[in-house]
Amino acid sequence: MKEQGWEIARIDELDAYQVDDEGLTWRPIRRHFDIRAFGANAYTAEEAGQRVVEEHREQNGHEELYVVLSGRATFTLEGEEHDAPAGTLVHCVPGTLRGAVAAEPKTTVMGVGAKQGEVFTPSPWENVFVAFGHFRRGDVDRARAELEDHVAKHPDVWQGHFNFACLEALAGDKEAALHHLERAAELEPEIVAKGAADDEDFDSLRDEPRFLAVTRQADTAGSST
């Protein structure tokens, strides 16, 4: 119990959220324990071949350590593949191109990280993952509540409004989707215009004049010859 200064939990006891359509499951370790010093999350792939670490570089000083807790993963680090059975540790300094896929079913990889030399702050993307996890389970109300809390705490961060717009578009509330998309565009017009135009989540809004205005397609939509 936390009142005693400690808490114990098993990975499979933590909340589990599906984070994509491929079956990847996210288990929010940091969020569960309310860790304030570093980020910690676990990802489980149900089938071999599914990703457990998305391909990316951390360009902002974020340092990460990955631990293969179960199964077997194949890490690709700067284009070079490495076999990683359970018990393997993979450390990536900032800027390293990394990614991993499961080599066996039910592979779980934990990631631990923080920025060097800075006080850690929890990443807002956790709220987005939780919200869409609820949405994929069919609980739209809890998904909305999660993102409402998120944008209330970060009203001037465009990503929160953009993801809220995605959620509302998928849920069928066009007015709410357009409201949040327009707010995101106010905060970051260039990125939002391109991102919304390319995002399939907004397919239900393609013919809406306000959507065309945000994505800067309004003029071209009305000038066909």
Image: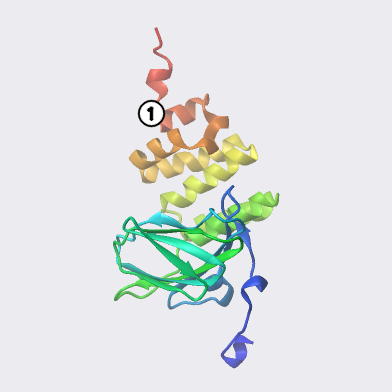
User: Residue at point 54% right, 53% down?
Assistant: 50
The quadrant holding residue 195 is top left
Q: Residue 20 appears at what percent x and percent y?
A: 56, 50
User: Residue at point 48% right, 31% down?
Assistant: 211
Q: Who is closer to the viewer here, 101 or 185?
A: 101
Q: Residues within 10 Å of mark 1 (few under 14, many from 20)?
A: some
Which residue of the protein is positioned furthest toward the top in this rendering?
225
Mark 1 lies on residue = 216
Q: Residue 126 appears at what percent x and percent y?
A: 51, 61
Q: Please identify the quadrant where the C terminus is shown.
A: top left
Q: Please identify the quadrant where the N terminus is shown.
A: bottom right
Residue 50 appears left or right of 191: right
Q: Who is closer to the viewer here, 137 or 145?
A: 137
Residue 133 vs 179, above or below: the answer is below
Q: Is residue 152 visible?
A: no
Q: Residue 164 appears at what percent x and percent y?
A: 54, 47
Residue 146 vs 116, above or below: the answer is above
The quadrant holding residue 2 is bottom right
Q: Secondary structure at mark 1?
A: loop
Which residue of the protein is positioned furthest toward the bottom in this rendering?
4
Q: Please, what is the three-letter code of the amino acid marked with disc 1? A: Arg
Residue 125 vs 120, above or below: the answer is above
Its colouring scheme is rainbow
